[in-house]
């Protein structure tokens, strides 16, 4: 990194902002203190054009925000001594430190991860709903499915379960996978709609991989017997 820092300092901004240089530099950025991070941060418009030229599949803002997230936010998310994730305080800190990067989407994802880790399902539900209200495409189908499954597995709260059913429905609209049908069926079963859950679990089983079939067969048998599929 010291050699790279010296190279960036000697070469100068104009010479560095070429497709070849950007392609080599961006995989090497891991910290906000990296010289290449500063180069990208201060020249986002030009770097964005170069990203398009070399077909990088994400925006410069999102790339920089992910570096900030990894360095600044993740420590707070996984620190067992932190009882409350103070989104407002963190947002103010990041706006002051990195005013040229929009980290709002990542902050909400971080807050979601925090409450997931704390198993605070109501707070997690509220954060996911806030995130989706800002950007309906903020979460992938697999992310929605994983969050819905966590609530199915660990929460008995009816409001949380209904929210999870909504996320599960959305995940199926986005991507029809056996595991998504399985989550949807199990949520229906847990909220008491076992009659409708069974055909969805049968559909999941038909689409299932060999690795998934054992669990899905067990879920289906329990649904038909009217017994819980959760612990």
Image (cartoon, helix red, strand yellow):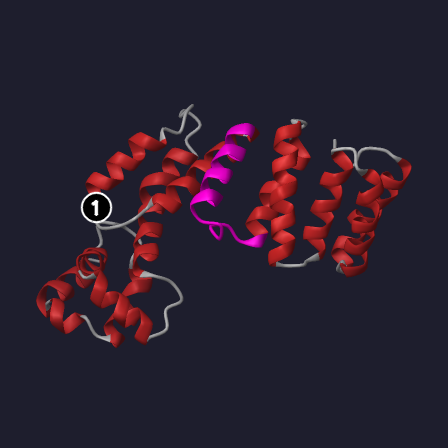
Residue 227 painted magenta: no
Q: Which residue is pictured at 54% across the width and 34% down the height?
A: 125
Q: Is residue 103 left or right of residue 18?
A: right
Q: Is residue 69 left or right of residue 115?
A: left
Q: Which residue is label 1 attached to?
A: 99
Main SS class of the magenta portion in the image: helix
Look at the image and give the residue range highlighted in magenta: 122-141
Query: Viewer-proximal residue, 3 or 54?
Result: 54
Is there any visible trace of residue 105 in the rendered image? yes
Residue 126 painted magenta: yes
Q: Which residue is pictured at 20% across the width and 42% down the height?
A: 97
Q: Position of residue 229 (x, y in %)?
A: 78, 37
Check the image and name the residue furthest to the right. 225
Q: Is residue 149 above or below residue 24?
A: above
Q: Is residue 158 above or below residue 145?
A: above
Label 1, residues with CA under 10 Å away: few <14, some 14-19, many ≥20: few
């Amino acid at each position: 990194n010291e050699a790279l820092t010296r190279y960036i300092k000697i070469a100068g901004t104009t010479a560095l902002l070429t497709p070849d240089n950007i392609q080599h530099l961006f995989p090497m950025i891991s910290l906000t203190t990296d010289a290449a991070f500063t180069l990208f941060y201060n020249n986002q418009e030009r770097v964005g054009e170069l990203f398009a030229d070399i077909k990088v599949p994400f925006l410069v803002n999102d790339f920089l925000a992910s570096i900030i997230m990894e360095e600044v936010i993740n420590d707070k998310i996984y620190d067992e001594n932190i009882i409350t994730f103070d989104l407002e305080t963190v947002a103010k800190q990041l706006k002051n430190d990195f005013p040229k990067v929009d980290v709002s989407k990542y902050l909400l994802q971080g807050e979601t991860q925090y409450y997931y880790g704390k198993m605070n399902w109501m707070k997690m539900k509220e954060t996911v709903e806030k995130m989706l209200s800002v950007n309906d495409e903020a979460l992938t189908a697999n992310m929605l499915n994983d969050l819905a499954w966590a609530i199915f597995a660990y929460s008995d709260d009816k409001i949380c379960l209904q929210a999870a059913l909504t996320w599960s429905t959305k995940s199926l609209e986005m991507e029809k996978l056996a595991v998504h049908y399985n989550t949807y069926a199990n949520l229906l079963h847990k909220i008491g709609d076992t009659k409708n859950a069974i055909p969805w679990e049968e559909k999941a089983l038909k689409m299932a991989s060999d690795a998934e079939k054992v669990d899905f067969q067990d879920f289906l048998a329990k649904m038909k017997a009217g017994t819980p599929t959760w612990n």
